[in-house]
């Protein structure tokens, strides 16, 4: 224990962070859980810092 308050966000730890939000789809394959990153709408890499902004981008993309 350091006696310091734990960091509440990335900015508390340092600078120069790169943010990215990903869409992960879950499926079952041969009785096992499969996780697939879907980059079709958000791209990879992307700069969506939070879920609400990624959801807006997804709704615009899926509405086409």
Image (spheres, rainbow, N blue to C red):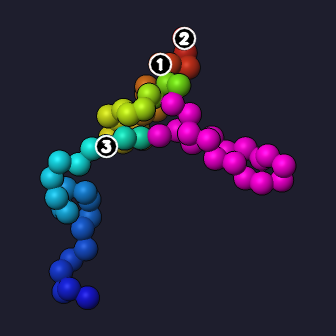
> In the image shown, does 23 or 34 lie closer to the viewer?
34
Q: Residue sitting at 55 percent across and 15 percent down?
A: 63
Q: Which mark is residue 19?
A: 3
Q: Secondary structure at mark 1?
A: helix
**Residue at the outermost top position:** 64
Q: Which mark is residue 32?
A: none
- 30 is higher (above) or lower (below) than 55: below
- Residue segment shown in magenta: 22-39
> In the image shown, does 34 or 62 lie closer to the viewer?
34
Quadrant in the picture for the C terminus: top right
Q: Residue sitting at 20 percent across and 63 percent down?
A: 13
> In the image shown, does 47 or 5 lie closer to the viewer?
47
Q: Which mark is residue 64?
A: 2
Tell me residue 12's x, y (percent).
Answer: 18, 62
Q: Secondary structure at mark 2?
A: loop
Circle 1 is placed at which residue position?
60
């Amino acid at each position: 224990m350091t006696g310091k308050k734990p960091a509440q966000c990335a900015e508390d730890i340092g600078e120069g962070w790169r943010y990215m939000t990903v869409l992960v789809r879950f499926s079952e394959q041969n009785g096992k859980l499969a996780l697939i990153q879907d980059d079709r709408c958000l791209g990879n890499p992307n700069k969506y810092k939070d879920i609400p902004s990624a959801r807006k981008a997804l709704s615009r993309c899926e509405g086409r």
